[in-house]
Image (cartoon, helix red, strand yellow):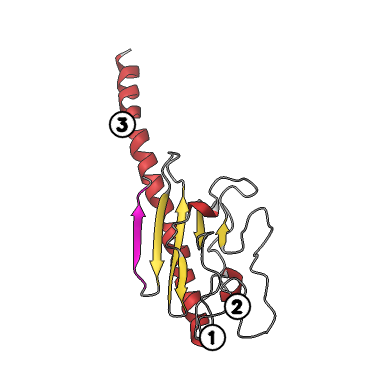
Amino acid sequence: MVVVAIIGILTSIAVPSYQKYQARARQIEAKANLANIYTAENSFSVDQSTFSLCLANIGYAPTSTNAMYYAVGFSATAAAATCGPLGNSSCLGYSGYTSTLISCIIGSASSYWNASLRVNAPGTAAGASTNLPISANVTNSTNFVAGAAGNISRSSVYDIWTIDSSNTMVNTISGI
């Protein structure tokens, strides 16, 4: 009986610690994806003298399409006409390579959005692009903020990260 009680006490201490460790490990996914968006945006801006809201256009691909917990990209409320060298083109489909607007959808429509890439639990509505911070936007042809939002600890609070055009990464809301 004493042994069972000791095991119960140890389990009640170990399980919450393990869950917190697991949530911290999941944050690496947000950091890696935001770093990739930063690199892709800067590569695109070297060629086009602008940034873009379109993840497909900048050549971004997620670090992994399996077991992802974060939505990454730009807010669904992002401005649509602040891109291009003159800052007057649509950010959703701007491409200096062609005069036709390109499709910004990557993958299937059930898992991805035009301006925001959502990869956790494909085909469900949870973690929609509206969970990304409103600041995740291309404000003009020389500045952008990309965001990541995910429910990594199974609470009602989303873990939110941002990275901007000066490579400043911030955990704006901790979901741990």
The answer to which quarter of the image holds residue 103 is bottom right
Residue plotted at (56% across, 45% down): 126
| Mark 2 or 3, closer to the camera | 2
**Residue kind at label 1, given as amino acid type:** Gln
Q: Nearer the viewer, residue 23 or 89?
A: 89
Q: Specify the label residue 13 is tagged with.
A: 3
**Residue kind at label 3, given as amino acid type:** Ile
| Mark 1 or 2, closer to the camera | 2
Tags 1 and 2 in contact by the CB under 8 Å rule?
A: yes
- The residue that mark 1 highlights is 48
Q: Give yes or no for residue 1 being in the magenta stretch.
A: no
Indicate left or right for 63 with 6 as reference. right
In primary-sequence order, the first of circles 1 and 3 is 3
The answer to which quarter of the image holds residue 35 is bottom left
Residue 71 location (% of width, % of height): 52, 55
| Mark 1 or 3, closer to the camera | 1
- The residue that mark 2 highlights is 94
**Residue kind at label 2, given as amino acid type:** Tyr
User: Label 2, label 3: how many angstroms apart (C-alpha)?
Assistant: 53 Å
Indicate left or right for 99 with 168 as reference. right
Total marks placed: 3
Residue 121 location (% of width, % of height): 59, 47
